[in-house]
Image: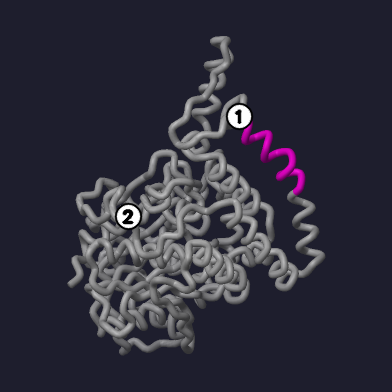
Amino acid sequence: MSHQRTDPSLAPGRPLPAMNLGTVAYIDCLIFCLFLAPTLVWKAGLFETVWCALQALPFLLLKLPITIIWDRGLPPFVGRRKRTIRWETERGQRNQRHQQLQQHPFSQRVTLFEDVVVRCIRYAFANVPPRIGRVFFAREVALPYLWFRLLRKGHFGSPIYWREHGDTGFRGIWVRKDPVKKPDLVLYYLHGGGFSMGSAHFYLEYLLTWLGLLSLAGYQNAAIFALEYTLVPDAPFPAQVRETWKGYEHVLDVTHNDPSVVCVSGDSAGATLVLCLLLCLGNKRLAVPTIYGREELDRLLPPTPALAVLISPWTMLVSTRHRNTVSDYLDAQKLCQYGVQFAGSYASAANPLASPGCCRDASWWKRASPKRGFVVTYGTQEVLAPVIEDFVDTLREAEIAVESRAEPGGIHAWPVASLFLSSSHEGRLDGLRALTYKIRQRIPGS
């Protein structure tokens, strides 16, 4: 997927979207921790919270600073994306250092702040129990933090309309330019988090920003619906797929059953659910019992959407081709554990309706494919990269329209993470701008 933009409204230096809160500052991090601490004690318990914090001290006080200094070059030099590194004077040391830096491509292309946060996320993913990890993304933390970010920029409310949606069988958040008029584009989004963490509320700033970019791209009344699906272990598969299905039916109702204006999208585990949804839409015999829990073969299935945009899709729950890298924050072994927990006792980790990358049936993928195909983006340095490449090859062999982009040196779900971590205004929006342009190419709107 090329990131070249021909739409002037999306080019760097052009007007920013209505929802643009700027880069995350250290005061934002402090306020986030102030909201997080009491919520951790409330939801996870005082003893477990303190014990987890004590276990993290050796990493925070020793391993983190030592590896940061070594990987980024000695002596430490804090710079922006364009910086120089003072090499050792002796030729042998210089060559050895060059090889070391080549092994950490992500560290060499980001700022110190971004590097530190990603390393902390890597530690947390591998070592912090999901019961504690999910609190970081909880509504009780995410919403107050967003309100603070808004107030810091002079907003006494969101400049873009949004509301929570609660219904029988599913919940979510609507973000809309005009809640009264019919939308000319609906982005149905599913968040990541290994099925055990994450929330639509944590993604709210990301979604509000994306809606602003969609409006700048020319959509008259774009809308986004983000599903708040049940996390594991509260409910394993197929509960999340059922909720994804019901959310999709709801989106079609809002569009007056017009799938030509619907784009389904998600990152990581959310992208898995997008693919599960598509495979269900493409196989009535398997989908109906999975979704409805009984045989109703006379039931009509909804039509497939216009487009699927996948950000670092977790296509196979378990794979020997998942490999750890020095840059990515995911851990292959922990990822396998999350995958097995998601599948539960209902399905194996090789069931295509739970692990879509296991489906090699070209005819099934053709029936499941959106009318305008797929857009897939991922990083070359992420744990999932080899399996994502296999998935893209499977689609191409089935002669399905797919455009993919492997970001050199990129890590998992960077278009999402960069909005919160990037130290430059353009860097925050670059990934979303590229995806917005791809959507605009395929779904022209009104």
**272 is higher (above) or lower (below) than 125:** below
Which SS class for mark 1? loop
Res. 105 in view: no
Q: Which of marks 2 and 1 is nearer the N terminus?
A: 1
Front in this rendered view, residue 396 or 39: 39
**163 is higher (above) or lower (below) than 104:** below
Q: Is residue 65 magenta?
A: yes
Q: Does the magenta stretch include residue 419?
A: no
Q: In this picture, which residue range is highlighted in magenta?
A: 57-69
Q: Which colour scheme is used?
A: one colour
Which SS class for mark 2? helix
Q: Is residue 301 left or right of residue 231?
A: left
* Mark 1 crowdedness (10 Å alpha carbons): few <14, some 14-19, many ≥20: some
- The percent coordinates of residue 179 (x first, y second) are 33, 82
In this view, the residue farthest toward the top is: 90
Disc marking residue 76: 1
Instruction: Give the residue type at disc 1.
Output: Pro
Front in this rendered view, residue 345 or 170: 170
- The percent coordinates of residue 120 (x first, y second) are 63, 48
- The percent coordinates of residue 157 (x first, y second) are 47, 74
- The percent coordinates of residue 3 (x first, y second) are 29, 47
In this view, the residue farthest toward the front is: 154
